[in-house]
Image (tube, rainbow, N blue to C red):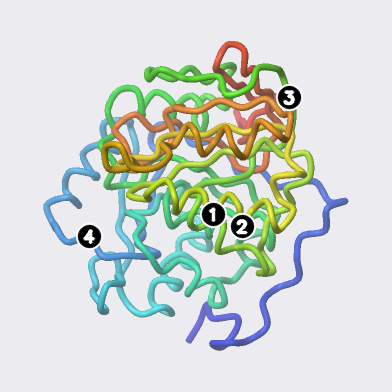
Amino acid sequence: MAGIIATEGGQLPTRWRSEHPLIKPRALRPGDTIGLTAPAGILPDYAEFDRMKNDLESLGFHVVFGEFVNHRHGYFAGKDHERALDLNRFFADPEIDGIIAVRGGWGCSRIVPYLDFDQIRKHPKVFCGFSDNTTLHLALLAYSGLISFHGPNGASEWNSFTKNSFKEVVVDGFKSVYHSRSRVETIRPGRATGRLIGGNLTILTTSLGTSYEPDFSGALLFLEDIGEAPYKLDRMLTHLSRAGALQKINGLIFGKCTDCGSPAGRGFNLNSVLRDHILPLGIPAISGVDIGHEADNLTIPAGVEAVLDADNGVFSLAEPGVVLVE
């Protein structure tokens, strides 16, 4: 089938060479067409398709849906090659200006062998999503050198805060300072610079040992998760530490961990787990940033240089994540 570049278990592409500059997609403009695709799980409520279309049209975009976006194959939105085919087609189609994942769930890593990263490199576009889409951000960076965007899925709430962040980053082309509406806690003060690398903690941890495992050297690591008890977060952070990843980063930006509490009076909480892992590293770190599975969701270009100001609980981009074209 067209668009498949490797059979199941086949060889994945060669990694993007670090000496080559990363590729930035063109900034989106009002009137552009957004392709909505489902690279992972199903969307059980079909009414959500109408809502996300309305949300994106309110930002001035036209919206089209992938051929397999509402298919069902077990808990996936279609078979692996079908979900990959939608994504490949959207990158190749000159009528599509940007791509947003409908939702996360599980399944993105299953489609990586079927993605045409050579074509993606030749036709760079804004790709946005979060949660399980962390895998695609890592793979796009590793194999195509493409900056992509950890931000709202199509099925996100798209409130005014989330819309404004998306617009500032992928339309206006810059975001001077990321301020959260939530209370941000300073785990350890200080300033640090580095490339923004990260996403969902669970999914990021599963990338270790793969050929799309990110380079953590000098990174500002941003993380979020949902429904994970503190002991599971502790286990994943310990895994990152034992793999040598945490020791390489310059700073930590921890977002929201929705429904990640312990039963009353039992064990550690999230902040105690974070402090236990981060304080010995001696790096600036903050938590509670508006990144994750909640209504307020910042849009972050994965792979660009940024500055963390942990004293004031903010971070900022040192460069835009898109190319502005007149």
Residue 292 vs 109, above or below: the answer is above
Observer-side mark, 3 or 2, equals 2
Observer-side mark, 1 or 3, equals 1
Find out whether the residues at labels 2 and 1 contact each other: C-beta distance under 8 Å.
yes
Q: Residue at x 56, y 25 (%)?
A: 286
How much space separates mark 3 and mark 4, taking CA atoms?
39 Å
- Report the disc number at residue 43: 4
Q: Residue at x 45, y 64 (%)?
A: 87
Observer-side mark, 4 or 1, equals 1
What secondary structure is found at the residue carrying circle 3?
strand
Q: Residue at x 46, y 42 (%)?
A: 224
Front-most of residues 171 and 281:
281
Name the residue that disc number 1 marks.
236
Q: In the rendered image, which quarter is residue 187 located in?
A: top right
Name the residue that disc number 3 marks.
192
How much space separates mark 2 and mark 1, taking CA atoms?
5 Å
What secondary structure is found at the residue carrying circle 4?
loop
Residue 63 relative to residue 224: left or right: left
